[in-house]
């Protein structure tokens, strides 16, 4: 298992400073939210992409990949009934995949709850098929670029579309592409009332990425989640991907959060 930290909590930090901080704390990778680099990743020049990639290498950290993919630009929606909106979203997926590949990133997390929820009056079956079409085309492009898309089940207080690992795996099996896999998130799984070790064991063959946090939206070990069985389950299935800490509360500061998170996880992994 490798340890990564998500960058959006480092508000207003230059990305190279995030890399330096992560490296100094012992992280092996940084996971980037694209909106922290630009409102539209198509505006990030080839030169700037090379600079970011070089900065990570100089700090001796990897770029794990991307998450919070569809926060900007506005209007993106993976399963909207409007063909033009879905096409615009697909085109942006292609651009995100290009960015991830240019940065030598490995994974892209499909979370973005507000850009996938089934709205009132929409057909559930059609919405599912629209999403499958978007994901299938994106996964084919990602496969050519050496990037893996990760379907993230999110709790039903965030979205009404794909709330459980079982639902995510149903989509994964229908897309049927080796570069379309599963990510599990501790906070969402806990808040959905599911037992994470059980979910890990059941769906380990699809699992390639993992978000560490707690049911209080904060850093791992700060809430009610029983973490030791989770780490033991990951060890048992020989998970070798990233444990990437993603928090939704940024107090008191990113360095404290990142430091406490890695110490907590390291202690469990090494015990």
Image (tube, rainbow, N blue to C red):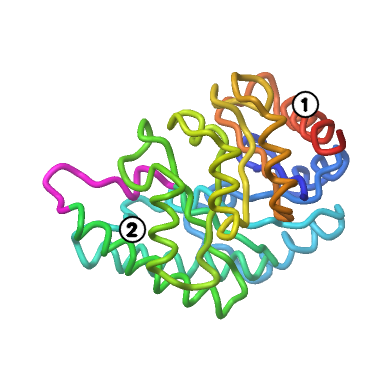
Residue at mark 1 to residue at mark 2: CA–CA distance: 35 Å
Q: Position of residue 250 (x, y in %)?
A: 62, 26
Q: Position of residue 224 (x, y in %)?
A: 59, 19
Classify 99 as above or below 271. below
Classify 136 as above or below 157. below
Residue on which disc 1 sits: 260
Quarter placement of the C terminus:
top right
**Residue 76 or residue 114, whichever sits in front:** 114
- Locate residue 257: give its quadrant: top right
Mark yes or no: residue 146 visible: yes
User: Any magenta on residue 113?
Assistant: yes
User: Is residue 34 shown left or right of residue 175?
Assistant: right
Q: Position of residue 204 (x, y in %)?
A: 60, 54
> Circle 1: is it few (<14), some (14-19), or many (20+) Cα within 10 Å?
some
| Point 74% across, 30% down: residue | 261
| Point 75% across, 46% down: residue | 235
Residue on which disc 2 sits: 78
Secondary structure found at label 2: loop
- Locate residue 225: give its quadrant: top right
User: Is residue 152 shown left or right of residue 63?
Assistant: left
User: Is residue 265 shown left or right of residue 233?
Assistant: right
Classify 89 as above or below 116. below
Question: Mark 1 or 2 closer to N-term?
Answer: 2
Q: Main secondary structure of the magenta part?
A: loop
Secondary structure found at label 1: helix
| Point 46% across, 47% down: residue | 165
Is disc 1 in contact with disc 2, using a CB cutoff of under 8 Å? no
Q: Position of residue 78 (x, y in %)?
A: 33, 58
Magenta range is 112-123
């Amino acid at each position: 298992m490798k340890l990564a930290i998500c960058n959006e909590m480092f508000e207003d930090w230059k990305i190279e400073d995030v890399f330096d901080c992560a490296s100094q704390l012992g992280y092996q990778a940084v996971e980037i939210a694209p909106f922290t680099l630009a409102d539209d990743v198509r505006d990030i020049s080839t030169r700037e992409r090379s600079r970011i990639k070089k900065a990570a290498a100089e700090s001796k950290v990897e770029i794990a990949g991307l998450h919070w993919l569809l926060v900007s630009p506005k209007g993106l929606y993976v399963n909207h009934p409007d063909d033009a909106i879905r096409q615009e979203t697909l085109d942006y997926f292609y651009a995100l995949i290009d960015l991830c590949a240019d940065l030598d990133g490995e994974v892209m997390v499909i979370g973005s709850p507000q850009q996938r929820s089934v709205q009132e009056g929409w057909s559930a079956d059609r919405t599912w098929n629209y999403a499958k079409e978007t994901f299938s085309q994106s996964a084919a492009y990602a496969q050519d670029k050496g990037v893996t898309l990760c379907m993230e089940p999110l709790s039903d207080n965030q979205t009404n579309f794909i709330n459980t690992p079982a639902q995510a795996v149903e989509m994964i099996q229908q897309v049927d592409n080796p570069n379309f896999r599963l990510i599990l998130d501790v906070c969402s799984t806990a808040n959905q009332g599911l037992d994470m070790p059980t979910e890990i064991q059941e769906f380990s063959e699809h699992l390639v990425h993992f978000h560490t946090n707690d049911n209080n939206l904060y850093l791992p070990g700060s809430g009610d989640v029983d973490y030791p069985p989770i780490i033991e389950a990951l060890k048992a299935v020989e998970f070798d991907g990233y444990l990437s800490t993603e928090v939704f509360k940024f107090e008191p500061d990113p360095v404290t959060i990142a430091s406490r998170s890695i110490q907590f996880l390291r202690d469990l992994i090494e015990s």
